[in-house]
């Protein structure tokens, strides 16, 4: 005869893409053959949670022989993955067994991975879970591993507490100890520098010698959000220039910082104890990256490099070496600013508004035009350049030649402008564009372009000539107009005139 021992229900959550769905963890205990069963579309890591929970319970002396444990994860049709359900399952068992008072978990959402020794490990997606909890009036408290507390505290309107050990959590829920809060871990003045340290390693424009044209191109790209392609020999400084771009963009505002942190959190790329990411992302994937790695994918959709670069910079060095399919997959994010992934286990949409900086050598050996060094055949060079032609090149606003730096420029002691000085001009130009049409210039829809740009007669006449002379497509015409609009914004001009167009079409080369 089976004897009912107890039951309990604990609130938790599952992250699908960037979305959070509520999960109710229901536990029922019956006297009988010892076993634990987890039902409700529990996958991989959730089912393995049984072993972690058993080991942690044994470690803490909570092991009770002769109990048949059934865990139901509701709703039953939602696939659950990851180890974040370990903690709510464990708390449910302890509550059903009478080791915790029934009301200890009222209004509490719990998530956390258990270590075999009863420690609590960080989970992915703590920030989106906290934002979800804060928006639900039935949830008053969020219980998390200590390593996730600072990240989660970016969500306002919810009490966040936790610990690094299950023993401490139980003591707190029994009223014998206090949970840790984010403020206890670190005071605001003692934040780890990691939050502000940019992904780009803090490159400053003043450290790059020479290259006035490329630096000007970076300023325009930053001000208008324009994609650009840097072409030059190895050692000309293309990578250093690209790494300077995040530092030329205005600092992330709170909403953008939450977006960036959420994506990194879901991808499992936030360090333990990290808070909001404040620096613009700089992502530089190797050319061997897969399509899924670049734009996102997997059976349980995860964000790719394009989304990790959201609100920042995606740098593709040695562009012709990337797979053609991989590059073609970038068209959707470049055009729509987001990536949609559809899978049987669920679809996901990840934001992906980044500035693309691509770099390439002028020929396979890299030294085209350098006397005595380049032996590439004309046909080889053509074939090499053809690899980047087509759809992707058609979405790059500016083509920039980066010549080798002459030694007298390297030795030039004159101070170059710092990133902070350029960033101030960029911020003003972006604010002008935002006031005019609510977006950066690179994202003005073609139908609104003519009206939004306000080009004068001289500018229009020169642009027409350039279209004929350079053989620009309709897209090319629009790109040149957008870049000219940005140049006028940097000058603080209301109308786009001849000078602005003249500079813009200079970045339309013949690559
Ligand atoms: Zn060559």
Image (cartoon, rainbow, N blue to C red):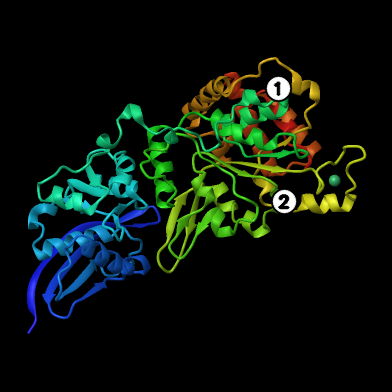
Please tell me which residue is depicted at 75% across the width and 31% down the height of the picture. 506
Q: Give x and y (percent) for residue 500.
A: 68, 24
Which residue in the protein does label 2 denote? 320
Q: Give x and y (percent) for residue 72.
A: 22, 69
Residue 23 vs 486, above or below: the answer is below
Please tell me which residue is depicted at 51% across the width and 39% down the height of the picture. 281
Q: Give x and y (percent) for residue 373.
A: 89, 41
Please tell me which residue is depicted at 85% across the width and 53% down the height of the picture. 380
Seen as rendered, the residue at the extreme top is 414
Give the quadrant of the N terminus: bottom left
* Residue 147 as seen in the image, left or right of residue 477: left
Within 10 Å of disc 2 (Cα), the crowding (few <14, some 14-19, many 20+) is: many
Q: Give x and y (percent) for residue 120.
A: 29, 53
Please tell me which residue is depicted at 19% across the width and 43% down the height of the picture. 179
How far apart marks 1 and 2 lie (CA) works out to: 33 Å
* Residue 199 as seen in the image, left or right of residue 16: right
Choose top left, top right, bottom left or bottom right for residue 408. Answer: top right
Which residue in the protein does label 1 denote? 499
Q: Which mark is residue 66?
A: none
Q: Nearer the viewer, residue 286 or 315?
A: 286
Residue 298 vs 141, above or below: the answer is below
Within 10 Å of disc 1 (Cα), the crowding (few <14, some 14-19, many 20+) is: some
Of the residues under marks 1 and 2, which one precedes in the sequence?
2
Find numbered disc 1 in the image and state the secondary structure of the residue it sits on: helix
* Residue 494 as seen in the image, left or right of residue 84: right
* Residue 131 as seen in the image, left or right of residue 421: left
Q: Nearer the viewer, residue 99 or 63?
A: 63
């Amino acid at each position: 005869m089976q004897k009912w021992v107890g039951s309990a229900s604990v609130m938790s959550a599952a992250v699908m893409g960037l979305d959070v769905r509520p999960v109710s963890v229901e536990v029922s205990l019956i006297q009988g053959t010892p076993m634990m069963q987890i039902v409700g579309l529990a996958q991989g890591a959730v089912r393995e949670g049984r072993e972690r929970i058993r080991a942690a319970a044994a470690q803490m002396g909570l092991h009770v022989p002769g109990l048949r444990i059934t865990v139901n994860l509701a709703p039953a049709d939602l696939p659950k993955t990851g180890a974040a359900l370990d903690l709510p399952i464990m708390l449910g068992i302890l509550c059903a067994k009478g080791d915790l008072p029934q009301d200890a978990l009222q209004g509490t959402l719990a998530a956390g991975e258990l270590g075999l020794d009863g420690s609590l490990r960080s989970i992915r997606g703590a920030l989106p879970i906290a934002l979800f909890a804060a928006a639900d009036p039935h949830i008053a408290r969020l219980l998390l591993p200590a390593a996730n507390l600072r990240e989660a505290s970016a969500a306002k309107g919810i009490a966040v507490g936790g610990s690094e050990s299950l023993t401490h959590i139980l003591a707190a829920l029994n009223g014998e100890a206090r949970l840790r809060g984010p403020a206890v871990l670190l005071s605001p003045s003692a934040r780890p520098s990691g939050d502000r340290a940019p992904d780009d390693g803090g490159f400053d424009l003043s450290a790059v010698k020479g290259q006035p044209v490329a630096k000007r191109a970076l300023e325009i790209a930053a001000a208008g959000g324009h994609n650009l392609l840097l072409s030059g020999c190895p050692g000309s400084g293309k990578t250093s220039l690209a790494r300077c771009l995040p530092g030329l963009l205005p600092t992330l505002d709170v909403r953008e910082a939450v977006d960036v942190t959420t994506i990194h959190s879901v991808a499992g790329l936030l360090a333990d104890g990290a808070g909001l990411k404040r620096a613009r992302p700089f992502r530089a994937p190797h050319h061997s990256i897969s399509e899924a790695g670049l734009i996102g994918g997997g059976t349980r959709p995860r964000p790719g490099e394009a989304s990790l670069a959201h609100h920042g910079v995606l740098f593709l060095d040695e562009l012709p070496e990337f797979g053609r399919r991989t590059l073609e997959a970038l068209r959707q994010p470049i055009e729509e600013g987001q990536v949609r992934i559809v899978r049987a286990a669920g679809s996901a949409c990840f934001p992906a508004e980044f500035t693309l900086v691509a770099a390439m050598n002028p020929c396979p050996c890299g030294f085209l035009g350098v006397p005595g060094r380049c032996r590439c055949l004309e046909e080889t060079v053509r074939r090499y350049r053809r690899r980047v032609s087509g759809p992707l090149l058609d979405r790059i606003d500016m083509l920039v030649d980066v010549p080798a730096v002459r030694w007298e420029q390297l030795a030039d002691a004159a101070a170059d402008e710092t990133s902070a000085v350029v960033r101030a001009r960029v911020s003003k130009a972006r604010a002008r564009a935002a006031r005019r049409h609510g977006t950066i210039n690179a994202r003005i829809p073609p139908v609104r372009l003519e009206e939004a740009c306000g080009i004068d007669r001289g500018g229009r006449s020169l642009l027409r000539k350039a279209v004929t002379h350079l053989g620009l497509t309709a897209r090319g015409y629009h790109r040149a107009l957008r870049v000219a609009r940005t140049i006028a914004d940097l000058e603080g001009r209301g109308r786009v005139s001849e000078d602005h167009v003249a500079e813009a079409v200079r970045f339309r080369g013949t690559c």
